[in-house]
Image (cartoon, rainbow, N blue to C red):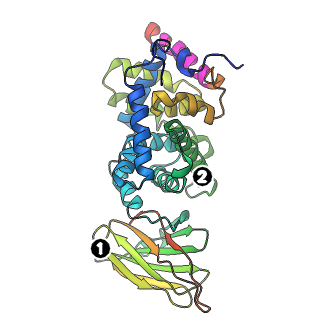
């Protein structure tokens, strides 16, 4: 089926292009990309060092059980990178902020940062890999597990960043 | 360089665009956040529609777009020409969308797989948004295509024209004929469109 001509779209005529342009225009109207997506992308790409691992979002579970109790709503999100996994539970507080409880697997002591659009919050995980941010403003944020040199039994490894999350 | 005497169908500006993307890629590889920002601004809508055409919900589609750009950062050095960039992005987005679905993050009824690409087609709400009668006829014709054709044309419609060839190759369709599936889909919609115009 190989043809000698090298320009594949030579077989598409103006009508084909008009159809494709028309389909594009329709989808731009009925299902446009969310307006805030480019900002989220810019945010997540900014300040990314070369020696950084990007964790992938693996699972996300909404828990409506808490909501059924009439208190708050939570969701659990798991990220994997080559060197570790990060599991976080995000809970809405009554005062409008968000609480984040997290675990690193394998368990290890690391500095953890939460970059929000306003500020960077810093905590550290304990021996069991647990960490918590008590009060986080709503909005876009991402977690950074700060890189650490290998030291005694507490582990260490490259910086790991998660994709930006909407809290 | 492009031989303009032969490529009579080339719309003006495509060589410019290719050159501009090549410059942006070079600058991005050199660490320019501004260049990277221009590339992501220009091509994020395409990735959004690839993810949505794969049947993902809005949140998941947004995550796919973000993940693809993050992965690009690790692959910038491997991508030498702009054509490779666009096809790499499309294929990676399809792969990420597939990966996300296979992890079952969100649940879809199986038969809504492709309908998500064209939400609630039967209700006619989209048709009301489209004021232009020509657009409505095209939309009805799209709705009568098979689901894979709907998804395929949706993706191709957002691919920059100079990249059709490399994208069609990357999607596993023969270069030269642009691929039997795509050819069939376009052929089909032309018939349906003639039908819409003649029959109503």
Which residue is the site of mark 2? B101
Output the chain of dot 1. A
Residue B96 in picture, x, y percent from top left: 57, 51
Does the rendering let one see residue B102?
yes
Classed neighbour count for the residue bearing mark 1: other residues with Cα under 10 Å, few (<14), some (14–19), many (≥20)? few
Q: Is A66 placed left or right of B173 in the picture? A: left
Residue at the spot of label 1:
A119
Q: Quadrant of residue B112?
A: top right
Q: Residue at x 44, y 18 (%)?
A: B10
Where residue B126 appears, as percent x and y from the top left, is 39, 32
Q: What span is in magenta?
A: B182-194
A94 lies above or below B114: below
Could you tell me how many numbered marks the image carries?
2
Classified by dominant secondary structure, the portion drawn in magenta counts as helix
Q: Does residue A80 lie above or below B184 as drawn?
A: below
Question: Which element is circle 1 on?
Answer: loop
Q: CA distance from mark 1 to mark 2?
A: 33 Å
């Amino acid at each position: 089926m190989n043809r000698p001509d090298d320009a594949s779209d030579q077989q598409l005529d103006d009508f084909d292009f008009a159809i494709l342009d028309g389909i594009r225009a329709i989808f731009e109207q009925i299902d446009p990309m969310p307006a805030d997506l480019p900002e989220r992308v810019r945010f997540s790409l900014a300040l990314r060092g070369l020696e950084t691992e990007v964790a992938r979002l693996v699972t996300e579970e909404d828990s409506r059980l808490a909501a059924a109790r009439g208190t708050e709503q939570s969701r659990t999100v798991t990220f994997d990178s080559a060197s570790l996994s990060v599991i976080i539970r995000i809970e809405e507080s009554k005062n409008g902020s968000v609480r984040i409880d997290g675990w690193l697997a394998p368990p290890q002591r690391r500095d953890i940062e939460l970059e929000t659009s306003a500020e960077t919050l810093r905590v550290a995980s304990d021996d069991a890999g647990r960490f918590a941010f008590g009060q986080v403003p709503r909005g876009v944020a991402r977690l950074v597990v700060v890189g650490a040199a290998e030291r005694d039994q507490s582990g260490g490894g490259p910086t790991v960043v998660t994709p930006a999350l909407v809290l | 360089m492009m031989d303009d005497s032969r490529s009579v169908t080339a719309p003006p500006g495509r060589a410019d665009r290719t050159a501009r993307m090549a410059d942006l890629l070079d600058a991005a590889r050199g660490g320019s956040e501004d260049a990277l920002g221009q590339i992501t601004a220009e091509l994020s809508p395409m990735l959004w529609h690839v993810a949505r055409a794969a049947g993902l919900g809005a949140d998941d589609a947004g995550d796919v777009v973000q993940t693809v750009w993050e992965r690009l950062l690790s692959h910038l050095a491997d991508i030498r020409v702009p054509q490779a960039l666009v096809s790499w992005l499309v294929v990676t987005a399809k792969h990420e969308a597939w990966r996300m679905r296979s992890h079952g993050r969100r649940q879809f009824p199986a038969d809504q797989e492709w309908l998500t690409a064209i939400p609630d087609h039967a209700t006619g709400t989209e048709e009301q948004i489209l004021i232009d009668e020509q657009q409505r006829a095209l939309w009805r014709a799209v709705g009568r295509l098979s689901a894979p054709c709907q998804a395929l044309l949706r993706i191709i419609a957002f691919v920059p024209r100079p990249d059709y060839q490399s994208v069609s190759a990357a999607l596993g369709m023969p270069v030269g004929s642009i691929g039997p599936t795509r050819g069939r889909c376009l052929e089909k919609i032309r018939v349906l469109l003639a039908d819409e115009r003649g029959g109503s």
